[in-house]
Image (tube, helix red, strand yellow):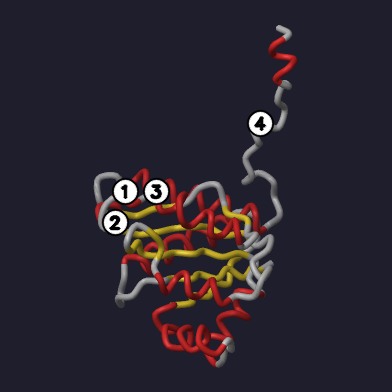
Amino acid sequence: MTRSIVVVSAGLANPSSTRLLADQLATATDLALRGHGDAADIIVIELRELAHPLADHLLTGFASGALAEAIETVRHADGLIAVTPVFAASYSGLFKMFFEVLEQDLLRGKPILLAATAGTARHSLVLEHAMRPLFSYLRAITVPTAVFAATEDFGGTGSGAFTERIATAAGELADLVLGSRRAVPSDPFEDVTPFDQLLKG
């Protein structure tokens, strides 16, 4: 069976490190799905090509043309890979604009792999303090492993660990797309002893 995996890339340059990371994640997700006997139909949405329609949508409240097609593509996706460059310690404005124009609940229950790129690793926490809360608010299901890429990660000395992280995140996305619970970690607080019982010894 072929699964629709939509890649949302907010890179501004052409080519960009953001798109490079997005492509690596898409390839790894396809490999993970093939390991389960499925395959991925990869569809890439380049947000830089939608900058003007996004601005028009914010002013008029209506999506048309390529933007309307992109929204429908996301609606029917089995899973998403969302990748943004880091600007001013957060996701890019273009990235936020796209997810702002999606109708309420469009992403509800949809598996999403989060990823970001920046010049240095000191921006890596953007995945947890900015991106994950955004998609939690949108009711999406984010995979446990997010991927951050600094400049040195592309062919650098730590590329082995970086490649392994990509494979792990892609495998988790594939598991969620296929409906497996293996990608969802158990809650360590699920079975907690009540405080009054602890006090009683």
Residue 188: % across, % down? 63, 31
SS of the residue at dot 2?
loop
Above or below, 176 against 98 in this view is: above
The Cα–Cα distance between marks 3 and 4, rounded to whole angstroms, is 24 Å
Residue where numbered disc 4 is placed: 189
Sequence order check: which comes first, mark 2 or mark 4?
2
Give the residue type at disc 1: Ser
Sequence order check: which comes first, mark 4 or mark 1?
1
Give the residue type at disc 4: Phe
Q: Is residue 197 left or right of residue 81?
A: right
SS of the residue at dot 4?
loop
> Residue 154, which numbered label?
2
Residue where numbered disc 3 is placed: 125
Q: Is residue 90 left or right of residue 154?
A: right
Q: Residue furthest bottom?
A: 65
At x 55%, y 90%, the residue is 60
- Nearest to viewer (mark 2 / mark 4): 4
SS of the residue at dot 1?
helix
Residue 104: % across, % down? 66, 71
